[in-house]
Image (cartoon, grey):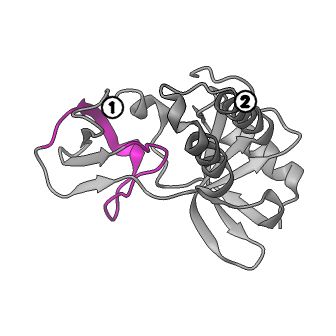
Amino acid sequence: MMEQKEIIRWIRTEQEPVPDLCGRNAYRSAAYLKDGVHLPCVLLREARAHTELALARFEESRKGGVADPRNLSDHYPNVVKHFVTEGNQVDLYDIARIEPSPYAIPFSLLSQMGDETSMGWTQFAVLLDEGTEVSFGTSYLNEFFDIPEGFSWDRVTKVVPHRSRTKPVYRERPFFTCFVDKVEFGKFKPQ
């Protein structure tokens, strides 16, 4: 079983950062929990940055920073609800071991996938070293993607934005967020 300090050290030395919603480094991995459950997609983020974002959104909503003041009574509770109840979470304390996730697209490839292909949809393809093409698509999440059997991101030779020639289209995967307390991962800067 890894100590929490070892997990943080491993993340910082072995994992490539990606930007999170706060513009901070976040790290993608797979994790085994203390009870043996395997989570193939876990995003580790700074607790403090997420807390500061939530407090700022609460304050904006409380002061009426909405387009239509008639919606203020619904808006503030909805903002609080979003930060408090939405998303899958796992505590760092519950993680026994961490390892690379095969579903985490390297940032160098992720940054080539392009902007939205159509409203609320981004599609791209990757070309593999033997000439095979694999299609990917996402509505908004790009932290982790399903992949075909035997696929490896290090076999990708080219990313083709907005390409949708092949079926099936591999979609984004659900993931767990692990908020790490008392650790700063730093502002995101591509490596």
Foreground residue, 58 or 112? 58
- Residue 9 % position (x, y): 81, 43
Q: From this view, report whether residue 9 is shown above or below residue 63.
A: below
Residue beneath label 2, please? 59
Residue 171 placement: quadrant: bottom left
- Asked whether disc 1 touches disc 2, contact meaning CB atoms under 8 Å apart, the reply is no
Where does the image place residue 153, in percent across and percent down from the top left? 40, 46
Amino acid at pointer 2:
Glu
Q: Is residue 160 magenta?
A: yes
Determine the residue positioned at 20% across, 33% down: 162
Q: Which residue is mark 1?
A: 113
117 up-or-down from 41: above or below: above
Q: Earlier in the sequence, mark 1 or mark 2?
A: 2
Question: In the picture, which quadrant includes the N terminus?
Answer: bottom right
| Quarter of the figure that contains the C terminus | top right
Circle 1: element type: loop
Which residue is at the far left?
Answer: 165
Instruction: Inspect the magenta stretch and tell me whether residue 152 lies in it.
Output: yes
Residue 156, labelled with which disc?
none
Q: Is residue 94 left or right of residue 101?
A: right
- Give SS at disc 2: helix
Q: Position of residue 66 (x, y in %)?
A: 54, 27
Query: Which of the 4 image quadrants contains residue 11?
Result: top right
Q: At 28% from the left edge and 47% from the top edge, which residue is drawn?
A: 136
The answer for how far apart the CA atoms under marks 1 and 2 are is 35 Å
* Boundaries of the magenta span: 140-164
Secondary structure mainly formed by the magenta segment: loop
Residue name at image x 43 percent, y 57 percent? 173
Horizontal side, residue 61 vs residue 168: left or right: right
Residue at 75% over, 34% down: 55
Percent position (x, y) of residue 151? 35, 56
